Structures are given as structure tokens and as C-alpha cells.
């Protein structure tokens, strides 16, 4: 038996772990107390890696689907040959744009896969590069462009006196507080920071908040506009910061004039003293931040909510100032020029491809996933016919039936997976790939993600590299995902240039040696080129380390800088006016037919549609959580089966009491549903929430994502469901 350090990649927290091995058998996984920052933290998903690793359904060979639907094993060499031939035919007949790729959370344990897929599509000449960034919080990126970007970054958490968390639950999701979130929250509390949480559920995070605003789902723009109204009313502006760095304050003040506390509280179901207490905390705090989660994004108008949160930061001057520590110092990326000055707003759309689907276009968040299923079936010239997939579409995309039809309509669907999953069951080729203990792990990727989404990356100059811990199982013929693209490019005679994603764009593309295939280690060296600390130095620390040479402070702004942050973007203020003018009760669509609002939420035991080790989710299925009083009213007890229906579909569900929920609000986690090769039993497999969701329901005007939370639903006890 031996114990060796590695990193859990079952979510973006990337907890350092100690893995007990008996030969190649994984016996136990626990937190790594020798690693800095995390203090030995792991969650049940990390500790279940032994079960996950010895998955009885593990694919040891890639599979090819035959015309009759059956599958046969295929060697890595043969599949490269066949896929290259198929691709050539498709590109010859329909052009490079008919080839698309999707990066989802499947890439988490494949450090080089993302950059390689991007490089491959660029080599083909296809712009059809999609990612889950246009499912989860595309509004963050778009709002940042409309508002302008602060070049000093966000305020370091060590300085926070407050943080406004909207529709996110870091204690479970780790997003925004990725390293041992409960400990981070306790430390903040001890230091006297006063957190504010807006969430219809009294979450694990809300329990640590000074003020919890338990608002009605879908009302985040209303509540945020109400807070801005109060900040103005309390004369709470950081006048000096705003005068130097922003414009549009008076137009914003006018735009929120109608969001009086009375109006906001009546509409969002809040108590006035709480709303005022939250505004008072924001006004009193000298340094702070805002953190938006998927709740605020999925309940519609996520772009507007993100924009209003940025406005709060600017009004209060919550941006890193000269001399302050950089909140996300770069270690395995090139050193950044952090400056206390704005970058003026820049276009968020209108520069890229416009699809034939509902006018949806490329935005700064990427190609719109909202267009993907229709692009796979359209008769328009931009039809997608070949698809390289790194995610769990079948469970994760809205409108499961449409997704299934779209995936089935593809001429060539290639999916990387460790098992035949709900999504890879649709693939023509399933590329059997490595498990997370069988690939090297490196922190560089998370630094890149942190450039796009402020909820990731580290607040200390921390970095790690761990070599692969285990060889692939004996007799297996696997491919690391990036290898497929390298070998296909070689077979197609395409010269490949490695494009690093994320970062500040300062890393030039690097041409590949197309004769000698690189190793995974060499791929990672390419990703880390020009890094602040050399990868070789990071490799010397088997438990990861904090690299003091990479610690950074914000430099003064250029006195000649004339750029200003924009508090009154016309598109955003028009949408806010629409919010104020609408008949909000009608828009909510809650009534006799659909008396409840279904919200999204995550659970500690699962990550999206990732594999679910047997026994980890105690119920097996994903419960429908309800306030116990609502259950009592419907005569329901724990475990009772109900039919949960929306305007779009219906699924079976099993209720579970959750006293932390607002009355009239129910919650269910996505990522569950029928599994391939087994008779569907909802009480074992759970239900696919995305059967209830339509891509066309109240889409965001900018990135097109539909209403995925605050969904009007009805609940009928099974006996009455008929
Ligand atoms: N209703 C509803 N739907 C949602 C959400 C919600 O809150 N509510 N959340 C959305 C969000 S935020 C996101 S980001 C998306 C997530 O959706 P996706 O980004 O698509 O990610 P996952 O579902 O986590 O994808 C995991 C799957 O990828 C496949 N996979 C591909 N490559 C590999 C590999 O190399 N290794 C392994 N092990 N597996 C691989 C496996 O089938 C695995 O199960 O879901 C979205 N869907
Ligand atoms: N354990 C676990 N961790 C994960 C994941 C996972 O599946 N499981 N997924 C990962 C991914 S892909 C992502 S994007 C992140 C997401 O990270 P978070 O955004 O923190 O995700 P959730 O935990 O779902 O928190 C969303 C919160 O929004 C609330 N909510 C729902 N509707 C509304 C609304 O209308 N308004 C407001 N204000 N709140 C609302 C819900 O009650 C819930 O508490 O988590 C990541 N980490
Ligand atoms: S929080 Fe859990 S799933 Fe996420 S990295 Fe840590 S141990 Fe793994
Ligand atoms: Mo996500």
C-alpha cells in the first residue's frame, strides 16, 4: 500500500487529494493536508473516486455504432482512419462550417483537450466552436463588455467587508469560493465581513450571511435595481471613484427611480427592513465584491442581473485599487499588467457569425448553444453535420427530446467518454478515454477559466502539477482526448497550430511538429509557455505550493487614461425600463394551472451529468424538494411519487421536505434521468429536469438561453395524475 498525492477534478474546486493505492487498485481518497490553502478539504464526490475509478461500466476500447444500432469495439488507429474519411466527405460536400465542437465539463480531467479542439476547428476553418459557457452564465461576460472592464481586477477577498451573492451556493458548488468554501466563509465572518445572499432558498451559504433576501425566483433584476435605488438614496456612492472612472450615474439613478423599496418588496416578496439592511451593508463596506451564480442566470435576464451587479461594484468603488493585492495572481500563465484603471466598454456581439436559428449570433461568451440543436437539423446552409462532443448534452441541455433528435440527425457524432452514457449512446464513435487518475493534472486551465468567469482561479499565487497517478487498465486501448484531434489533423494533412485559450491573448499560437506526436506532458508545457513561474519549478512541489514570486499588486492607473466604466448602457437600461413597465405577475406565469415555481439547484453528491458512483446519492434519484407546508397542503409525504409538469413537458418525481425553501417554490437538480442499457426506473435513475424546459421559453435577448429556473410547474400526486 502507498499513498500518493493527486488532484480531484470532479468539480472546479480541484481539491488536492491523497490516494491510497494497492498496486493499481484505488483503496481510499482523502484530503491532502500537506497542500496549502485547502486545509485537507474534500467532499463526498472526491472521497468516492475509488468507486468511480473502478466503474464496472468503464470502457476499455472505443466503440463504433453499426447501421443496425449495435456497437463493436474499434481500435484507435482504425477509428482515426474512419473518422478522417467521414470528415473529409462532409467537408467536401458541405464546407468546414458543417463541423462543430462542444466543450463541456467532460474536459475537466483532460488538460489539453480544450485548446486542441479549438486548434483543430481553426485548422479545418470552422467557426462552430461551442461550450457550456453559453449555457451557464453567458450574461457575466456580455455584461462585463457593456459595462467596461476594470484592469486591476476584483477586490481581494482578504479585504472584503461584504460580498453580495446572487443565486449561487458556493458551499455546495464551490463557485466563487472554490477552496474549502465553508472555511472561507467562517474566516470572513470571523473577520467581520457581512455577506448578503439573494436566494429563494435558505441555503448552506445563506446561513452564513448577515442578510438573506429570500426573493421570489426570477426577480433578481428587480432586487438589484432596488439596491441601487437605495444606494443612491443613502448617498452611498463612492463619489471620488465614480467621478474618476465612470459615466452614466445620473441616468442610472433615473432608471432605478421606480424601483422604490415598497415596489421592490411587493414584487419580489421581501421585507423592507431586510432590503434596507442589505443596502446599508453595501454602503458601509469600504471594500467588497459581488458573486453571481447560475440561479441569477437561469431565471431569465441573466445579462441584466450581471450588469446591475457590476454597477453596484462601480458605484461603491468595489474594484482593486492601486497597491492592493491582485485577487487572482497568475502563476502558470504569463505575468499580467494589473492596473487601477478602466477599460472602456467593448462590443459584446455583432462581430461574429450569425446563425440561421432565431437570429442567434456569436457573442463574447462564444457561439450560442441555444442554436445548437436546431443547427443540427436545419435545412439552412449552416447545418452542423459532424460534432465532436465533450459534454453531457442529453442530461444538461434544455429540451431533452429535441436534443435527442438533433444528436440522432448528425452524420458523424464523435464523443469522448469513460462509459456508454445517456449522451454517448447517441454517438457514432465513442472514444474510450482516460480516467482522471490516469492523466496529468495542472492548475493552468483554471487560471484561464478565471479570466472568463470570476468564480474560479485562486486568490493566492498557488499552482500545482501532478503527473498521471496510474497507467490505463491492462489491455485497454484508450486515447487522451487531444490525441484524437492531433491524429485526425495529421491524417487529413492539416497543419495544426496550438491555440491557448483564456489568458490575455499574449501567448502566440505555436505550430505543432506534425511528424512526432507530442506527449501529454509536452502538451502541458505548451499550455504553460511564458508562465510567470516556470512549469519545471511548479513540478518540484508534489503537493502544489504558493509561489511568492508570482504574488502581485495592482499598479497605478495611467493618469492620461480617459476610459470610463459605463453605468448607463442604453441596451441594459431599456431592458430595465421594460422590467419596471411589465405586468410582472403575468410574466411570472404562476397561477391555477402552474401554481409552483421550479428552481435549479446543485447537490453536494453530483456534478451535472458526471458519473454517479453507486450509493453516493442516498435516494438514488434526484428528489423534488418542497416546503413541508406545501407538501402538507397537497397531502404529500416524503418519498411520494408525483407528476411534475410544465408548459413544455412532464416527468415523474419523488418529493422530499426542504424547509429552507420559500413557499410556492420547489427545486430539483439536473443531470439525472434514464441510463442506457437499462429499463428506466425513475426511483433508481431520477428524472431529467430538462424535459420540462424549452429552448424558446423567454430567451435572453443576447445569448438566447431560455428560462431554466423560476419555471412555472404543476404537481400532482401520482394517484391523481392519471
Ligand atoms: N436544468 C438545468 N440544466 C442545466 C443546468 C441547470 O442548472 N439546470 N446547469 C447547466 C450548466 S451550469 C452546465 S455547465 C451544463 C453542464 O453540462 P456539460 O458541460 O455538458 O457537462 P456535464 O454534464 O458535466 O458533462 C459530463 C459528461 O461528459 C462526458 N465526457 C466527455 N468527455 C469526458 C472525459 O474525458 N471524461 C469523462 N469522465 N467524461 C467525459 C461524460 O458523458 C460525462 O458524463 O449543464 C447545464 N444544464
Ligand atoms: N456539487 C456540485 N458542484 C458544482 C456543480 C454540480 O453540479 N454539483 N456544477 C458546477 C457548475 S457547471 C456550475 S456552473 C457551478 C454553479 O454554481 P452555483 O451558481 O453556486 O450553483 P447552485 O449551487 O446551483 O446555486 C444556484 C442557487 O441559485 C438559487 N436560485 C434558483 N433560482 C433563482 C433565482 O431566480 N434567483 C436567485 N437569486 N436564486 C435562484 C438556487 O436556490 C441555488 O441556491 O457549480 C459547479 N459546481
Ligand atoms: S469539492 Fe469535491 S468534487 Fe470538487 S474537487 Fe473537491 S473533492 Fe472533488
Ligand atoms: Mo456550469
Image (spheres, rainbow, N blue to C red):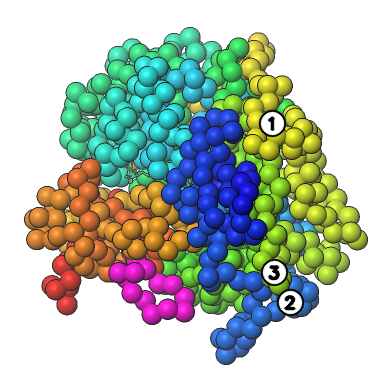
Q: Which mark is residue 331?
A: 1
Q: Quadrant of the C terminus?
A: bottom left
Q: Position of residue 444 (x, y in %)?
A: 67, 40
Q: Nearer the viewer, mark 1 or mark 3?
A: 3
Dot 3 alpha-carbon crowd within 10 angstroms: few under 14, some 14 to 19, many 20 or more: few
Q: Is residue 44 visible?
A: yes
Rendered residue at 89%/59% (across/down): 516
Q: Secondary structure at mark 1?
A: loop
Q: Measured from the top left, where is residue 613 in percent x and y?
A: 46, 61
Q: Which mark's residue is nearer the viewer, 3 or 2?
A: 3
Q: Secondary structure at mark 3?
A: loop
Q: Position of residue 715 (x, y in %)?
A: 19, 63
Q: Residue at x 48, y 9 (%)?
A: 240
The segment highlighted magenta reads: 674-687
Using the rendered image of the protein, determine whether residue 706 is visible from the camera's viewpoint. Answer: no
Cα distance, mark 1 to mark 3?
36 Å
Residue 578 as seen in the image, left or right of residue 67: left
Q: Which residue is mark 2?
A: 75
Farthest residue toward the bottom? 68
Instruction: Please give the residue where the numbered disc 3 appears in the rendered image.
Output: 474
Q: Looking at the magenta stretch, what is its main secondary structure?
A: loop
Amino acid at each position: 500500500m502507498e499513498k500518493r498525492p493527486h488532484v480531484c477534478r470532479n468539480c472546479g474546486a480541484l481539491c488536492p487529494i491523497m490516494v491510497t493505492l494497492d498496486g493499481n487498485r484505488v483503496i481510499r481518497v482523502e484530503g491532502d493536508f500537506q497542500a496549502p490553502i485547502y486545509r485537507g478539504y474534500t467532499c463526498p464526490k472526491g472521497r468516492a473516486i475509488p468507486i468511480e475509478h473502478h466503474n464496472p461500466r468503464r470502457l476499455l476500447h472505443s466503440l463504433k455504432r453499426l447501421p443496425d444500432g449495435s456497437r463493436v469495439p474499434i481500435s484507435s488507429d482504425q477509428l482515426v482512419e474512419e473518422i478522417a474519411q467521414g470528415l473529409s466527405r462532409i467537408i467536401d460536400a458541405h464546407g468546414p462550417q458543417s463541423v462543430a465542437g462542444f466543450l463541456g465539463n467532460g474536459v475537466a480531467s483532460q488538460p489539453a483537450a480544450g485548446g486542441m479542439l479549438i486548434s483543430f476547428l481553426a485548422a479545418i476553418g470552422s467557426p462552430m466552436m461551442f461550450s457550456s459557457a453559453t449555457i451557464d452564465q453567458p450574461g457575466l461576460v456580455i455584461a462585463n463588455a457593456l459595462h467596461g472592464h476594470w484592469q486591476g481586477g476584483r477586490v481581494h477577498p482578504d479585504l472584503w467587508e461584504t460580498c453580495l451573492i446572487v443565486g449561487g451556493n458556493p458551499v455546495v458548488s464551490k463557485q466563487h469560493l472554490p477552496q474549502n468554501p465553508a472555511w472561507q466563509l467562517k474566516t470572513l465572518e470571523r473577520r467581520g465581513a457581512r455577506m448578503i445572499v439573494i436566494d429563494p432558498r435558505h441555503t448552506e451559504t445563506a446561513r452564513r450571511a448577515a442578510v438573506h433576501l429570500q426573493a421570489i425566483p426570477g426577480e433578481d433584476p428587480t432586487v438589484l435595481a432596488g439596491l441601487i435605488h437605495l444606494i443612491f438614496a443613502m448617498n452611498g456612492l463612492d463619489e471620488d471613484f465614480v467621478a474618476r472612472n465612470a459615466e452614466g450615474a445620473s441616468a442610472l439613478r433615473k432608471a432605478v427611480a421606480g424601483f422604490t423599496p415598497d415596489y421592490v418588496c411587493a414584487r419580489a416578496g421581501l421585507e423592507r427592513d431586510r432590503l434596507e439592511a442589505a443596502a446599508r451593508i453595501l454602503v458601509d463596506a469600504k471594500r467588497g465584491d459581488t458573486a453571481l451564480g447560475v440561479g441569477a442566470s437561469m431565471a431569465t435576464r441573466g445579462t441584466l442581473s450581471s450588469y446591475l451587479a457590476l454597477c453596484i461594484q462601480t458605484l461603491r468603488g468595489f474594484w482593486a485599487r492601486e497597491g492592493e493585492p491582485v485577487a487572482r495572481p497568475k502563476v502558470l500563465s504569463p505575468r499580467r499588467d494589473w492596473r487601477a484603471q478602466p477599460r472602456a466598454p467593448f462590443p459584446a456581439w455583432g462581430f461574429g457569425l450569425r446563425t440561421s436559428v432565431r437570429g442567434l449570433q456569436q457573442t463574447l461568451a462564444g457561439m450560442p448553444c441555444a442554436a445548437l440543436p436546431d443547427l443540427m437539423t436545419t435545412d439552412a446552409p449552416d447545418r452542423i453535420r459532424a460534432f465532436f462532443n465533450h459534454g453531457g448534452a442529453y442530461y444538461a441541455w434544455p429540451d431533452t427530446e429535441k436534443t435527442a433528435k438533433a444528436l440522432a440527425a448528425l452524420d458523424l457524432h464523435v464523443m469522448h467518454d469513460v462509459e456508454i452514457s445517456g449522451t454517448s449512446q447517441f454517438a457514432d464513435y465513442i472514444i474510450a478515454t482516460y480516467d482522471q487518475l490516469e492523466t496529468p493534472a495542472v492548475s493552468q486551465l483554471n487560471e484561464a477559466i478565471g479570466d472568463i468567469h470570476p468564480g474560479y482561479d485562486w486568490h493566492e499565487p498557488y499552482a500545482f502539477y501532478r503527473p498521471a497517478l496510474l497507467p490505463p487498465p491492462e489491455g485497454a486501448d484508450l486515447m487522451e482526448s487531444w490525441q484524437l484531434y492531433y491524429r485526425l489533423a495529421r491524417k487529413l494533412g492539416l497543419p495544426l497550430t496550438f491555440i491557448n485559450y483564456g489568458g490575455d491573448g499574449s501567448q502566440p499560437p505555436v505550430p505543432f511538429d506534425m511528424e512526432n506526436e507530442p506527449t501529454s506532458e509536452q502538451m502541458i508545457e505548451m499550455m504553460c509557455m511564458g508562465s510567470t513561474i516556470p512549469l519545471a519549478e511548479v513540478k518540484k512541489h508534489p503537493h502544489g505550493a504558493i509561489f511568492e514570486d508570482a504574488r502581485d499588486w495592482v499598479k497605478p492607473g495611467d493618469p492620461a487614461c480617459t476610459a470610463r466604466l459605463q453605468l448607463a448602457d442604453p441596451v441594459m437600461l431599456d431592458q430595465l425600463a421594460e422590467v419596471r413597465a411589465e405586468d410582472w405577475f403575468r410574466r411570472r406565469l404562476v397561477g391555477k394551472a402552474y401554481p409552483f415555481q421550479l428552481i435549479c439547484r446543485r447537490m453536494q453528491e453530483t456534478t451535472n451529468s458526471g458519473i454517479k458512483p453507486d450509493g453516493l446519492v442516498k435516494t438514488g434519484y434526484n428528489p423534488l424538494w418542497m416546503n413541508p407546508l406545501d407538501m402538507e397542503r397537497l397531502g404529500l409525504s416524503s418519498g411520494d411519487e408525483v407528476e411534475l409538469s410544465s408548459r413544455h413537458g412532464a416527468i415523474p418525481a419523488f418529493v422530499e421536505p426542504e424547509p429552507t425553501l420559500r413557499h410556492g417554490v420547489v427545486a430539483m437538480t439536473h443531470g439525472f434521468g434514464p441510463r442506457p442499457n437499462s429499463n428506466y426506473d425513475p426511483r433508481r435513475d431520477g428524472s431529467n429536469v430538462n424535459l420540462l424546459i424549452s429552448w424558446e421559453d423567454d430567451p435572453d435577448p443576447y445569448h438566447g438561453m431560455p428560462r431554466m429556473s423560476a419555471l412555472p410547474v404543476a404537481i400532482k400526486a401520482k394517484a391523481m395524475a392519471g
